[in-house]
Image (tube, rainbow, N blue to C red):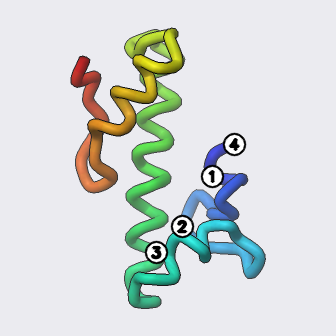
Amino acid sequence: LFRLGLGCSDAGDLRDDARAHVYLQELATDHHRDACGMVMQRARELEAMLQRKELPQDRMQLLHVLTHNRLDQPLTRCL
């Protein structure tokens, strides 16, 4: 769902009308695929962690976890 909302394919390609273009506009064009790839990897990790119930159910605690992670590193619980 997150990927679809941004307009990214699994491969990191963007649709012409992708919302991700707004977030990528400050990056060099040749970095767009890498940036989308990082986002997609973190999204897959997040989905897996949620399915395994490794993350807080409380939305504020979950937001805390997400905001203390980086796109270029694997997700951690950091509670």
Q: CA distance from mark 2 to mark 4?
A: 14 Å
- Measured as percent of width and height from the top left, residue 24 is found at 50, 76
**Residue at 34%, 27% in the rendered image:** 65
Name the residue tied to disc 1: 3
Tell me the mark number nearer the camera, choosing from 2 and 4: 4
Name the residue tied to disc 4: 1
Name the residue tied to disc 2: 12
The N terminus - image quarter: top right
Q: Is residue 6 above or below residue 59?
A: below
Rendered image quadrant of residue 78: top left
Q: Amino acid at mark 3?
A: Arg
Q: Amino acid at mark 1?
A: Arg
- Say which element carries label 3: helix
Q: CA distance from mark 3 to mark 2?
A: 5 Å
- Measured as percent of width and height from the top left, residue 21 is found at 60, 76
Quick one: label 1 or label 3, which is nearer the N terminus? 1
**Residue at 52%, 30% in the rendered image:** 47
